[in-house]
Image (cartoon, rainbow, N blue to C red):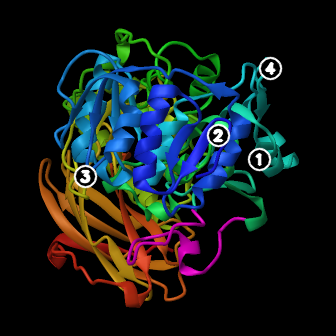
Amino acid sequence: MTEARLFRSVEAEDAFAAAVEAFRRDGGAVPVWVGPRADLTAGLALAEEVYAALRVPPQAARGHLFGEVPEAVRRLAEPLAAHWSAGPDGPPDGPGSVLLVGTYAALSSDRVRRVLESAHRDGRDVSVLTGRDVHSLSWTTAKQYGQAPAGAPTGVFTDNDSRPRVPGDAVWLGPEDIAQRDVQDLILSGRWGRLLFNGHGRDDNLNLGQFTLCGRSPAVERAPGALGPQCAYGLGCYKPEDKLVPAHRIPAAEIVLNTCLSGPLSDLALYDPAYQILLNALDGPAQTVVAALTTNNGDRPENLAWLRGGPGSVARRLDASAADINPYPAFLQVGLGTAGDQAPEDSAAGQSAAEPDEAEEPWALLGGRVSALLHSGLLPGDHALRPRLERLHGTLLRDAQRGAARPAGTRAEARRSLDAEVAALDLALAQQIARGADDPLLEFPIHFGERSRASAAEPGLDCACGRPVWRYRRVGRLPVVPETYQSTCLRCGDVENSFVGAPALRVESADKVALGGVLPVTVEVTAVQDGIVNVGLVVPSYVRATIKPPVRRLRLAAGENKRTGFEIAVAADAEPQAYYHQAYAVQGLALTVLRFHFGAVPGDEFDHVTSDGRPARESEVSDVRVR
């Protein structure tokens, strides 16, 4: 047992139990059951520099225990909620804030999702106490008693927001600052009250230019057979290793990881817990870590909402700020936030626009889609398809002007000519995407989403991983921004994005492929209108793989569905890690994209799983060569 000013480590469970009772009775340093986890003592030592004193922590209205929580840990957590319950079904419904307590493995989506959705709907706080094991859980619980010093610095590090810094006392580093400063030293040498990091990332990392917040724990062994990033396979980091910022060494009382998938629930995590950035941060001194459960479009508005502060938990404030683009619980807060429940504000985000009338003449529908592609800023000025889109735009302007006064025969002839021009452009769009996933066409979900307002989320068809999704409509704030649908899965993120009126897709695929092997993918397409649907499959440019065929063309009647097949041949020298493929369909200039995650692993770790889909008959399908 080591003595310290605020926290003290205890190795034996019985000694920890006695220390908890003594702490509750007499005060003093907060005990932490480190057991064999010697690495946690470094976090305790750093916490002595982050916190100035002990406090009486905020108290939730209701607490609930998931899984096997040791009695001594329960006793340490007991003052943190007014009323307690336990069991796999979660807390009973009721008013007030909720605190969920359990190891990370116990916090699965089937247990936690209902609580998160209910609280999000009602505008209530949900906080979590967790860790990779009971020792990390005891440490997270103990840290709730820490009090950061008044006036401790606040910092925002954003690689996404290039707009001018916000006036005030907070340290604010945008992309240009990150490119010029030693971000690693700035973060690790400070003693911070609150820190927010905003950049691209996922389970195991958050990118800040050449610097990377890293989730790898140096003290935890990788689980056999679990998927990991490429460093798990002895290949090192994909970013400069001398610019890594280990999350457990960040000296801050509060850390916000404003990126996608930085805090997935345990059964939805992509990577082994040994690489989870949330769990790594919790092994350090931070008493509060806020991370994204799934896809998260948080940007400057959310950064400012966090910086301003206010009543309610950090996660609730961020969710409220992002409700117009992510109308679901996107953030998970580990650690107790500010007390004070508020009723949810009325929002136009719950209003849904009427479905377009497909029986009308096509000018408005097609014209809107052409304008979106040409004039919304989605495609750069030198994009290969801009000349053809400009020609079609001119055709629509001409035909729309003259159409009402035309005799029926001339009108029908113009429609046939227009249909042929649109069909040719549909094929060109599909071929352009097939040439590379970096094409700006595939950026439409984020480009249009950031300029739209989301309706209330509703249950949709299950994700390809078998879990339910939230589906919601996004209405453009400007005439050149089309209405789109997005479907989001807690495990897989925004798995489906489509224009309203685009073909529907479903995908069947194994979730693992051996390096040097072939991954078969079956795509089921449902048409919205009669005609040809162009269907393709694409992987990111960093994946060493080839796809055959690049594009297929299926002739369908409105409402009809057909299945077709593709093969992804993964190179033997590809990096073993998580990847994804995207099925897409184009018809009537409307695009649907469906994402599916898979892992490429060395052959000796591969457990072969095959798809049960069948390719469409050759009479139904024609292949397209991409030149």
Q: Earlier in the sequence, mark 3 or mark 4?
A: 4
- x, y percentage for residue 550? 40, 72
Residue drawn where x is 21% and y is 18% of the image: 94
Tell how many labels.
Answer: 4
Q: Earlier in the sequence, mark 3 or mark 2?
A: 2
Name the foreground residue: 493 vs 126. Answer: 126
Q: How far apart, in angstroms, are the residues tagged by discs 4 and 2?
A: 17 Å
Q: Is residue 537 magenta?
A: no
- x, y percentage for residue 150? 72, 19
What amino acid is found at the position of numbered circle 4 in the picture?
A: Asp
- x, y percentage for residue 350? 30, 18
The part of the chain drawn in magenta is 217-239
Of circles 3 and 1, the one toward us is 1
Mark drawn on residue 463? 3
The residue singled out by tag 1 in the image is 188
Of circles 4 and 1, the one toward us is 1
